Structure formats: structure tokens, C-alpha cells
Amino acid sequence: MYAIDYEDFGTPQPAEASGSVTVEIDGRPVTVPEGTSIMRAAALAGVKVPKLCATDTLKAFGSCRLCLCEIDGRKGYPASCTTAVAAGMKVRTESPKLTQLRRSVMELYLSDYPIERQPTAAEARTELHAMAEKLGVRSTPYANGQRHLGAPKDESNPYFTFDPNVCIVCSRCVRACDEIQGTFALTIQGRGFASKVAASQDQPFLESECVSCGACVEACPTAALTEKSLVALGPAERVEKTTCAYCGVGCGFEAEVRGQGADTEVVRMVPDRDGKANHGHACVKGRFAWGYATHPDRQLKPMIRKTIRDDWREVSWQEAIGYAASEFKRIQARYGRDSIGGITSSRCTNEETFLVQKLVRAAFGNNNVDTCARVCHSPTGYGLKNTLGESAGTQAFDSVMKADTIMIIGANPTDGHPVFASQLKRRLRQGAKLIIADPREIGLVRSPHVEADEHLQLRPGTNVALLNALAHVVVTEGLTKEAYVAERCEAESFAKWKAFVAEPRNSPEASESITGVPAERVRRAARLYAKAGNAAIYYGLGVTEHSQGTTAVMGIANLAMATGNLGREGVGVQPLRGQNNVQGSCDMGSFPHEFSAYRHVSDPVVRKSFEDVWGVKLQAEPGLRIPNMFEAALDGSFKGMYVQGEDFVQSDPNTHHVSAAMESLECCVVQDLFLNETAKYAHVFLPGSSFLEKDGTFTNAERRTSLVRKIMEPLAGYQDWQITCLLSNALGYPMNYRNAGEIMDEIARLTPTFAGMSFEKIERLGSIQWPCNDEHPEGTPTMHVGQFVRGKGKFWATEYVPTSEKVTSRFPLILTTGRILTQYNVGAQTRRTGNVVWHAEDVLEIHPHDAEVRGISDGDWVGLTSRAGDTVLRAKVSTRIAPGVVYTTFHFPETNANVVTTENSDWATNCPEYKVTAVEVVLVNQKDAWQKRAHEERALPRTKHKDRTPA
Amino acid sequence: MNIDLLIKMANEIGDFFTGATGSEQAARDVANHLKRYWEPRMRQQMLAYYEQRHGAGLSDVAKNAVGLLYAASKAPPGGAPAGSAAAGSATGAKA
């Protein structure tokens, strides 16, 4: 069923047409690209051909036979969806004969459909009913024949139902699963009359391989597949475009809503077909898991308390803001200007993060601002800046459709970036080669119609050794693109790098004992990458979250430069950003050493440009990073924090250490949707707003800035940027923006890469990839075309330095962490949605060998211990990880894998080394002591009064 | 702050630059990195430690780097900033 404002052209636009063709349809001339179907040409001419199995998101199928037409000079009645136009063709889509045929077809469809009963609201709006009505068919002469009615409805999925009674077996759901999502979970089972749609081995949807992306639901022309929210709430009244608040893909959405003002409610979220990041596709989180926005756990009133042992007291906004400001002033007066700081959030908009860093620099008067990118992609910023010249990915997502070889390092796109993964899989099904470097057998290693050509299953912590080995093959086998490098890169640094990687100690054979990857496999992978016409690297936190995270990013850039794989479509170095606005929050100057657009605070010219606009003197020294803030808190020199939309007590490593630091603060202000783990240490709680309640922009992993629109009024009264303004004004530094667009105007004024952006232009163009300036007024899909941003590309010799985190007899296993499709980051959002049916707790994946020697069976409680701490979770015995390695996710505070992770961090950026922790795993029969304490704390009432009435 | 952690961090920065640019240039690069990315109280604590314990526990490169910062901190106002010879080499041309 379609979004309420969507026009369906029946079949997709031809991929690559070389010319155009003029035809006549029902007497109307129309010129279309070669290869266009008659159905699409007719739609473009304003003629709607009846159809059921066709839709413009899927390849033509020619099954339903409703779209028959007549063509002058041709026999019969060809299907207009599968027949391409030809020059001079004259087509009729309406005639008495065609009407008769279509009515007969429709009567046959309805012979196995409960047409006699009153349709539900959802059924009445389907294409089937619309077509029947158009053809004037309200009954069927075959009603007394055998039918499929009475089959049980599958309600297992939390978000949609499957009712076989109203299924017409048109295959649109099956094709959507295959062509759009690439999961191949659905099939038409049986032959002839026994044909039916089945999930996996005729299982309930919930138990099948279905990943609940919803593409099948959207494609269904009947109400066989229907969103439960649509059934519960009824049809939407209007549509508002916005941008998803989950991962760094940044999907465009159309929020279908009903009601006005405070009564506005979302009926469903439909991926925007004009969305340039997602092209009408979505995942289970973006499409379905938005219920957290109105979850009863939302805290909607400001609260304060004198100490973190006290009960919360609900107060007015004025009192809360006033208290926070007075505490920050008191702390600075007593402990000095640099004793407080602030944290921006990658879940908030560009405008909101820009304001928080402005508040810290201008109102607090220091540079103690940092962001959650510290713990994910800060090495990307440093590594790419110092090699290519810009702290961002080089490509648009669409670029992957021109890649011949795709290398994925330390990323799990089908779980972390599922919509991009679907696009990636489309390219792989077209024949692109795939190399995966990952300690774990991620989904892309082997899935339906996709198999990695090489899986380099390296030991955690050895990325740099592997990258050097790959580079060794490239250099010693003469696979470097010398002319490209000579033209675009520094000769001296290239020569040094070549000499370095060519050393025998960097050969695949020498590094095999370090990485665990067979040398010949490394050699094959290097050749596959270097010899491809277009080779692209996509990487994730499996690269950055290491003590050598930055070194590995540089190693990746080295490889791409040496093989000429930068500066055009189909190639590139693309970090897969974790959160929706990680790129944007970094762009906006959230790091303590940089203003927006990655300009160092010590640069007097840049600093003056901000001082002129902001009207205050700014500091030239870098501020504290998040882990430095914790250290400073423990030594007593850091006493206050303003935390907008981040939960580092759950997300940051070494939880006990972080908790001790937080306990030492005299004023922590948490601004969030929920009372999260960090709020346990807060003195002021300011209720934030969800992405549905605010205006602003997000910038995704491809530097694409898209509008976020206020769909409903903020439940607690204010958008997040307005709360920052209130705090700033209370501190005596005026912020008086009338709307979020004015903040973007200031960003554009002060940020060269955003100079040409405005809400008006983003609205007009749909989205814009920065840099957007006079030279590129409509943005820049591909970076480094012609030359690198820094001028000449710089190679760095990337010496492999083993992490200090080593296995010992006490801690003989390596823990590495990651994420799963249905949960998101610390789970604050997804844990409050139906997604918990798939993943209700974090589990520990352990290889059968390691499990057996410890007497562990699947589902057992196991204790996970490192030098930092202990936790208890259930074991999942799996061959997806190698012996000696265990794996878990970090979505649930009840488990909190970060109790176990350590203080180790990347040398350049302090990004934590989440991916390598030496641990032991033992069979246990009860939860750990801290977990019991945490459980008891959660069970306690947190406020004396709590209702959902806004302040 | 925890001086052991600061020492570990400085040594790891030194490890990278030693491999990347050679030990002579590395000290200047490390000094420059500490100046551009370490908050002043972190540097001050490291300098105080350097003064008191002569950089015990620091690798040669890290010790030389801190020595450069220490010398600069003792230089009269207007003197050349520590690590200035490395400026631009370790942090990107357009930083």
C-alpha cells in the first residue's frame, strides 16, 4: 500500500537509456527513454493503465494480466508492463475488448478473495479494491468454487500482519524482498491452486529469515500485508517529509500523520522514494521503531536534585534552567573557568550541536566540548584529514553501483547500515567482487546470492598489520598506479611509504602469524582490490575503535591513493558512520580542538571570524576530550557538565571508572528523552525532544545534509536547541534565534563547507552533500575530484604496534563488540519498541571449542571478566567467530558490556579500544553483584510525582 | 590526572610518529601533537612530571618531545613555540 501522495509509474525508469523514443498512447504523443515500458510511458503521458502486479519500485513481472493493451500492427494483447516502447508505436490502453478481458481477470482474482464481506478500512484503500471499482467488478461468478478463505492470519511480527485470505499471490512481496531488500526470505510455495506466499520454510514471519524491513508491506496491493499501526489508527491525513534518526545512512522518510497540534500522531513512516540516500527503502528501525517517541518512559518535566542520592523533584523550566546556570556559575567561580564542559550528541541536529559547542566556547568561555564521535569515528577525522585533507567519506552511497571490487573492513552493513547494505547487495548480485576483513563471519560473508570472494578473518587488533600486508602485495607486485600518484600525491611521502611496506616484515607471509590470515588469501585480496577498474573501501568501527584506529584509517587511505581509487564514482574511502548525525556533529565543531569545518582553535584568523560574530573572546588552546573530562573529574579539576543526548555511562568503556568520575561532579545537567544511565549521576534533568518534535538538519555518512521537520509539538514544550538557548541566556550569554533556520544561517556564515546552505535550498534540492559553496552551489557528491582537498595526497608509513591489551592465562580470550540489526547503540530508543521481540538481551557469542572446554552450552549464563570488571550474560555458541574470540553487543544496560572494556584508546584521538579486550568466560548460575544493584536501583521510584503532562 | 595514563598516551603517540617519520622528526611531531590535541592541564601535568622525574617511563621519542615542550615553557615570552618546526608536518596542511 502506498504513501498517500505517491504516484506509481508502474515500472522503474530504465537504468541506462542511450536515446529517446516517441510513441502515441491513447492518441497522446509521449517521448521517453529507450527501454521504457508502455505502462510507464502511459503514466508519463497521464494515462493510468490498470495493474496489480506492477509497481515502479520493482522490475516488471507480467503476471496479473490487467495491464493488457493493443498495439497497432501487433497481434494479441501484450502486457504493457513487460513490453518496451518502440519508435512510432501506437498503443491503446482502453477498448471494449480490453475492458472485457480485464473484468474477466478481475473476476478470477475475486473468486478467491472475500469480496462479499465488508472490507476493513485498510482493505478498502488497497489497489485491488481501487482496480475492481475502476473495472466495475463487485462480485464474481466463480464464488462457489474452491477458495483459500479461512487460513489463519500471521500476527507474529510486531509491526505488520499477513492475512493469506486477502492475498492474490501477485509476488510483489516476494520480489520486494528479493530486489529491494535482498534477503530472499519470501517465496511462492506450491504450484497452481496450492500457490501461496510463504516466509522461509513456511514459518511465521517472526521466526523466518525476514528482517522486517517492510518493503513487502509497502509493495502489497491488497491488505494481505498491513502495518498494525495503520489498522489501529486509521488512514493518515497528511504527509510530512523528514529524515530518520537512527543510523548514518540518513534515510529520507514521509511521516504519515493525522490530527493537529498536540493531538498529532504518526500513523506510519514510509521511506521517501525521492530520498537520495535510501531511494524509497528502509529498515526495521527507521520504518517501524519510532514508538519510543511517545513511550510512557519519556520524562516530560524538568527535574532537579541537590545530590545524586536525593529523589528527583519536578520543577518549572524556569527553575531548572536557573538552577543549572547558577550551579555552573558557582562552580566556575570556585574551581575556575575550565572546570565545566559540555557534550554534543550525534542524535541531535546540526543546529543543536552547533549551539551546544557555541554555548561551551562562548558562554562557558572554554573549549571543553566533545561529542560521542569521540568513541566511534574520531580516528576517521584525524586519519582522513592528514592523508586526503578532509575529515569525511569521499563518496555518495550510489557510488557503490559503479564499484567493481568492494572491500569491507570492520563493518557489518546488514546490521549497522541495512539500507546501504541492500544497495550494496544489489551491486554484488550484478557481479561486483567482495572482500571482507572482519574477525567475525558477518552476514555478507555468505547470504542468499552473495558470497565474499575473500573473507580475511583476522585476529582482533591486527588491522594495521593486515593493511600493511595488502599494501606490500600492491607495491611489490607492481600494482600501484604510478601516474595517478605522481600527479596527485606527495612524491616524498609516497617513496617512504613504498619502501616501508615493501619491507619483508610487512609481507603477507610474515604477518600471517600476527593476523592469522593465510598469506595467499591476503595476496588474492590485494590483487582483487588493486586490479579492479573501480575499487571501493567501506569501513566501520572495527577499524576505528582500536589503539591504532587512526593508523588503520591512514593505511586505508594509503591503499586507495596508491591504487588510484579516489576522486571518481565507484571508488573511494567511505566510513560507515554509526549514528544519524555523527558526520554533522563533527562538522559543527563539536571536538575540543576544532571549530566547525575542522579548523583548529589555535588559528587566529578562524578564531577571529567566530569572535566577530559571537562577540566574545575565544580560547586558543584545545579543551578536554570526554575521557580527559573523566580523568579531570577524578583529580578534582572538572566539576560540571552539560550533556545533551548522550548516555556515556552506558556507551563509554570501563563503566566503573566512568561512574566514579561522574559521582565526583557537583553539577551534571542531562538533557534527554529518558532517564538514562548517565542521568543517574545528574543533578538537573531537562526533558529533550525526539526527531519528530523538532526542526533542523542531519548530515549522513555521505556528507548529505537533509531536513528534519517538526511533525508534532515537543512533548515537553521545547525543541532541544531552544533549551540550549534558555540555558545560555540564563548564563548571561544571549542566544535569541527565532527558528532553527536562523542557526543554519549562522553555520553557513561561519563554516566554509556549509557556506551555500540554507533551509530553503535544502528544501528545494531535497538534500545537499557538502562542500556546498560558490564553487559547488548544489553540493559535492564525490570528493577529491581532480586533486585532493589538502593539495597533494600524503602517504604515512603505518607501523604496526600491537595493542597492550594481550591475552594471558588469566584472560585467554579476546572480546570484541558490535551491534545488531534490531537494536541501536545503547538501545534507549529501540529497547522501547517492538524490536525487543528479536533481541531482548545482549548475548555472548562463543566458538563451540571455547564453549566446550569451559562446559558451556547454548543459553547458559556465563560470567565475562576482564581486568576492568565483570558482567553476566547468556552464551550463544556460534561458529561465526573464530576460536579464541568472543563477541557481544552493548544495547542493554542490564548487561552493559562496557563494564568489561578498558581504558585503552587510539593514540591520536583517545577513541576507546572497544574491539580488543582480554577476557575470561566461565559458567555461572547468577547475575553479577553490580547487575543486582543496578536492577534494584531501576526498580526504585525515581521521582515523587510523575505523569505525562508537559510542564 | 592519572600520570601513568598520560605517559602511556605519550608513548603511543611516539610509537606512531617514530614509525611514520623517523625518530629525529618524531619528537617534534609528538610535541606538536601534544600541543594541538592535549588540553593545557594535561600538558602541564606532564611537564611537571618531566621536571620532577626526568620523564621516567617515557620512551625516548616521547621524552624528547616533552623536553621540547618543557624548554619552550621555560623560554622567554615571544620565543619559538615548541614543536614549531614540525607544524604542518604532522597535522595536515589545512588544519
Image (spheres, coloured by chain):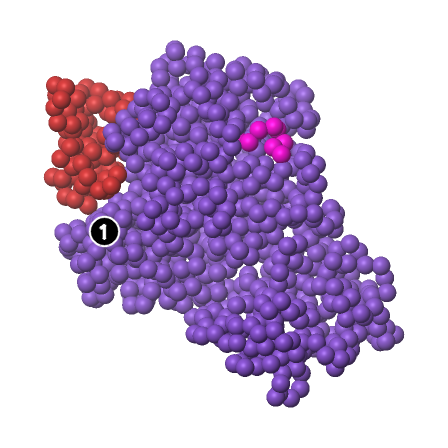
Q: Does the rendering let one see residue A211?
A: yes
Extreme right residue here? A144
Q: Position of residue A638 (x, y in %)?
A: 38, 20
Judge whether residue A831 is colored magenta: no
At label 1, the amino acid type is Gly
Q: Position of residue A531 (x, y in %)?
A: 29, 68
The residue at 53%/55% (across/down) is A274
Q: Does the rendering let one see residue A145?
A: no
How many numbered tags mark residues here?
Answer: 1
Judge from the rendering whether residue A64 lies leftward or rightward of residue A595; answer left or right.
Answer: right
Q: Position of residue A943 (x, y in %)?
A: 64, 22
Chain corresponding to red in the figure: B
The residue at 34%/62% (across/down) is A535
Q: Position of residue B18 (x, y in %)?
A: 18, 42
Residue neighbourhood size for the residue with mark 1, other residues' Cα within 10 Å, grouped as few (<14), some (14–19), many (≥20): many
Judge whether residue A719 is colored magenta: yes
Badge 1 marks a residue whose secondary structure is loop
Q: For residue B7, which quarter of the picture?
A: top left
Judge from the rendering whether residue A124 lies leftward or rightward of residue A618; answer left or right.
Answer: right
Quadrant for the N terminus of chain A in the image: bottom right
What color was chain A assigned in the picture? Answer: purple
Q: Is residue B62 placed above or below A57 in the rendered structure?
A: above
The residue at 32%/26% (across/down) is A612
Is A178 in front, or is B58?
A178
Quadrant for the C terminus of chain A in the image: top right
Give the magenta-colored segment's residue range.
Answer: A713-720
Is A348 in front, or is A444?
A348
Q: Main secondary structure of the magenta part?
A: loop
Which residue is tagged 1?
A793
Is A20 in front, or is A702?
A20
The residue at 66%/45% (across/down) is A257
Disc 1 sits on a residue from what chain? Answer: A
